């Protein structure tokens, strides 16, 4: 969700209004995603690096995040119909106690939901997520809850902040024209993920942009599936080759032996 500050600057608005516009855009994009059949959405609400920003801006972001999530969880009838579970994924130890208490209260109010999932990456970076997973694994090994030889990729994924809840990423959208991932879900984007870099600022990212992004992904996946089916048709197993060709040939009578005529 990048571009709130530039949106405010371009419109001659206070910085707070840019973040407010971004919060409003979140609800609209989520509504579009869920209507189109998307079950899981993760939003990069706050990077750990954002703690380097001025404190008044951080406080504004925290306040808007709490109010917007509370609205989604308890007030918006559309989201109640979607049965959305809100889940915070990130380093909670870095969040002020009062803010964390409010967010966990919102999270708890939707714990029985689950037809759709909204993951809030807050505060988050992929590096911190991976370090967290490694630390969890080390502690489990020390407690003899996990054997070293049994550690694999699945073990790492199970100990992320997501704790195995979120599947791999199908589409990652980066708004505002920057062509970098900014330490976001690097592990989850490793396979068959489509990364969409949009020049649109996040507050301007509306229904059309969301629909178009998902439509392009759907078309791309359709082509991939068609190619896979075509390739599968070209692959015939040894058993099928025997059945189609070798066995019928064996049932035929032996052809006449060739004769050699000696030429003087």
Image (cartoon, rainbow, N blue to C red):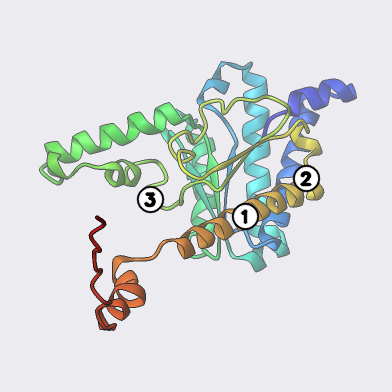
Q: Position of residue 94 (x, y in %)?
A: 45, 28
Considering depth in this image, is 222 or 20 the residue closer to the camera? Answer: 222
| Image x and y of residue 86, in percent | 54, 52
- The Cα–Cα distance between marks 3 and 2, rounded to whole angstroms, is 29 Å
- Counting residues from the start of the chain, the first of labels 1 and 3 encountered is 3
* Image quarter hosting the C terminus: bottom left
- Residue ID for mark 1: 223
Can you tell which quarter of the image residue 153 is in?
top left
Q: Secondary structure at mark 1?
A: helix
Q: CA distance from mark 1 to mark 2?
A: 21 Å
- Mark in the foreground, 1 or 3: 1
Callout 2: few (<14), some (14-19), or many (20+) C-alpha neighbours within 10 Å?
A: some
Decide: few, some or many residues near mark 1? Use Cα within 10 Å; few <14, some 14-19, many ≥20.
few
Determine whether the residue tagged by mark 3 lies in a helix, strand or loop.
loop
Q: Is residue 50 visible?
A: yes
The residue located at (49%, 32%) in the rendering is: 124
* Residue 175: image location, x then y, percent: 70, 33
Residue corresponding to mark 3: 164
Relative side of 172 to 251, left or right = right
Q: Nearer the viewer, residue 98 or 33?
A: 33
Is 179 on the left-hand or right-hand side of 131? right
Mark seen at residue 209: 2
Q: Residue at x 62, y 19 (%)?
A: 55
């Amino acid at each position: 969700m990048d571009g709130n500050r530039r949106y405010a600057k371009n419109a001659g608005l206070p910085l707070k209004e840019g973040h407010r516009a971004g919060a409003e855009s979140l609800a609209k994009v989520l509504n579009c995603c869920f209507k189109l059949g998307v079950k899981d959405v993760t939003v990069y609400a706050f990077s750990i690096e954002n703690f380097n920003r001025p404190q008044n801006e951080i406080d504004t972001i925290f306040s808007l995040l709490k109010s917007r999530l509370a609205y989604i969880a308890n007030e918006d009838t559309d989201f109640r119909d979607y049965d959305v579970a809100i889940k915070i994924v990130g380093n909670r130890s870095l969040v002020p106690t009062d803010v964390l208490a409010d967010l966990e209260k919102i999270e708890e109010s939707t714990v029985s939901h689950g037809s759709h999932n909204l993951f809030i990456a807050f505060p988050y970076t992929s590096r911190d997520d991976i370090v967290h997973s490694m630390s969890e694994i080390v502690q489990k090994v020390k407690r003899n809850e996990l054997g070293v030889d049994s550690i694999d990729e699945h073990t790492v994924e199970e100990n992320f902040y997501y704790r195995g809840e979120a599947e791999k990423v199908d589409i990652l959208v980066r708004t505002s024209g920057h062509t970098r991932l900014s330490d976001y879900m690097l592990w989850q984007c490793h396979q068959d993920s489509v990364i969409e870099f949009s020049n649109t600022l996040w507050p301007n990212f509306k229904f059309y942009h969301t629909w178009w992004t998902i439509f392009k992904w759907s078309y791309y996946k359709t082509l991939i599936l068609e190619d896979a089916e075509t390739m599968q048709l070209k692959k015939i197993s040894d058993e099928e080759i025997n059945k189609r060709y070798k066995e019928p040939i064996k049932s035929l009578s032996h052809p006449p032996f060739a004769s050699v005529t000696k030429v003087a």
